[in-house]
């Protein structure tokens, strides 16, 4: 697939990345794919931390990146730009019997004053999606784990029609031709524990710049025109792409997209931009990372003046920030219809 460029409404933060391994006071190598929200007057970030081998060890060929272990770290900020990482990781679901290998890619949503965290879980019997709730980021109660293979879940910040709602991305390999053809779905729940009434929201074939899979990105934000939400879109080129990062072979590209969902029935798409919102272009997105050409949005904050902060993992290596005005983002979705 050809070159992809970011929308002109997007401004990258000049001091990107906002968080990287050097900011973390415990073993850290890849610091990325964070969930961010505002809670009790502060910005809060939970981030994925892959640790175990240094980049130098990987580069020297003495250690392989896939030996990395993962935990979830915690950081706070007063302005959403300068972050201070807490002394210890805040969440690690790996179980002593080895069945749960790790949890990662957290996303945060505040609902009725409590913080809910969605996360992915690798187990010996498949990839699962989890939901936990916390009030202090010290104690997390795990409320729900999906059956495999389903992850990349994000919650809406309020009940809709009396039910909690989530976007999610199952991996239906068997019925989609035995390869990646994965779509965005949604489900509802009366209590965060039992989920059902599932609907397809967006098929991968409807995203012009994806030829592989798509998935939910940052949790939706509410606007007058609908639920504004990002997603990630993947195109793959095994013929011309090869080594692209520390990994021996990486032939995918991850791009951020944007769509608007109906306020009362979010399984209905009001509009979707036919072009990427953020495509990997900056040096920290396109070179020098673990997997280059990866944009993975996980947090979106709507400020009172209409600025939207979009946080995204870049190159599976660092955490970055870009901003846009909410009206421009809505226009991108509605004018594309
Ligand atoms: C996905 C997830 C993400 C990661 C992305 C790109 O499948 O593993 O955590 O950012 O691939 O490597």
Image (cartoon, rainbow, N blue to C red):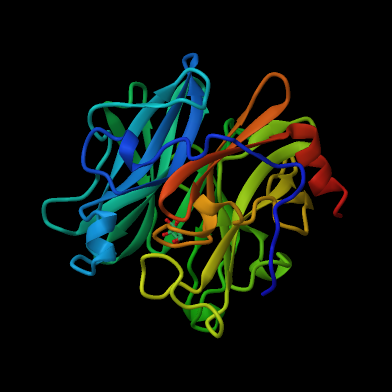
Vertically, is 262 above or below 139?
below
Question: Is residue 178 found left or right of 335 in the rendered image?
Answer: left
**Looking at this rendering, what residue extends furthest in the top direction?**
41
Furthest-left residue in this view: 96
Which part of the image, by quadrant, shows the N terminus? bottom right
Query: How far from the left and from the top, in percent, is residue 198?
Result: 57, 55
Would you say residue 301 is visible in this rendering? yes
Q: Quadrant of residue 75?
A: top left
- Which percent across, then down, holds residue 89? 25, 35
The residue lying toward the viewer, choosing from 38 and 320, is 320
Residue nearer the viewer, 12 or 78: 12
Residue at image position (63%, 47%) is 230
The image quadrant that residue 137 belongs to is top left
x and y, in percent, of residue 163 in the image: 57, 37
Please indicate whether residue 71 sits to the left or right of residue 197 in the image.
Answer: left
Quadrant for residue 77, please give it: top left
Measuring 72% from the left and 45% from the top, which residue is drawn there? 261
Q: Is residue 193 visible?
A: no
Q: Residue at x 64, y 34 (%)?
A: 221
Image quarter where the C terminus lies is: bottom right
Q: Nearer the viewer, residue 116 or 57?
A: 57
Q: In the picture provided, is 230 more to the left or to the right than 298?
A: right
Instruction: Determine whether, in the image, residue 271 is placed left or right of residue 246.
Output: right
Q: How many marks?
A: 0
Taking the image as four quarters, which one is ligand 1 found in? bottom left
């Amino acid at each position: 697939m050809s070159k992809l460029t970011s929308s002109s409404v997007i401004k990258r933060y000049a001091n990107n990345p906002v968080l990287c391994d050097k900011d973390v006071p415990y073993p850290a190598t890849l610091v990325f794919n964070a969930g961010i929200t505002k809670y009790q007057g502060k910005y809060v970030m939970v981030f994925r931390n892959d640790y175990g081998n240094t980049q130098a060890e990987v580069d020297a060929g003495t250690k392989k990146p896939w030996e990395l272990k993962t935990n979830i770290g915690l950081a706070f900020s007063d302005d959403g730009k300068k972050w201070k990482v807490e002394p210890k990781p805040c969440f690690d679901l790996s179980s002593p019997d080895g069945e749960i290998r790790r949890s990662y890619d957290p996303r945060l949503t505040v609902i009725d004053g409590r913080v809910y965290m969605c996360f992915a879980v690798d187990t010996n019997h498949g990839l699962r999606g989890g939901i936990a709730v916390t009030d202090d980021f010290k104690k997390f109660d795990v409320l729900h784990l999906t059956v495999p293979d389903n992850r990349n879940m994000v919650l809406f910040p309020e009940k809709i029609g009396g039910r909690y709602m989530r976007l999610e991305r199952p991996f239906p390999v068997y019925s989609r031709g035995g390869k990646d053809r994965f779509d965005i779905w949604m489900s509802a729940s009366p209590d965060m524990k039992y989920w059902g009434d599932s609907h397809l929201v967006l098929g991968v074939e409807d995203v012009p710049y994806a030829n592989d899979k798509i998935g939910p990105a940052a949790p939706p934000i509410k606007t007058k025109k609908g639920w504004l939400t990002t997603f990630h879109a993947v195109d793959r080129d095994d013929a011309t792409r090869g080594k692209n990062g520390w990994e021996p072979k990486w032939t995918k590209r991850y791009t951020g997209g944007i769509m608007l969902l109906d306020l009362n029935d979010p399984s209905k798409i009001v509009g979707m931009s036919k072009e990427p919102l953020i495509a990997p272009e900056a040096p920290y997105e396109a070179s020098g990372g673990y997997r280059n050409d990866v944009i993975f949005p996980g947090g979106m904050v709507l400020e009172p003046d209409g600025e939207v902060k979009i946080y995204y993992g870049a190159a599976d290596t660092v955490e970055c920030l870009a901003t846009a005005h909410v009206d421009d983002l809505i226009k991108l979705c509605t004018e594309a219809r």
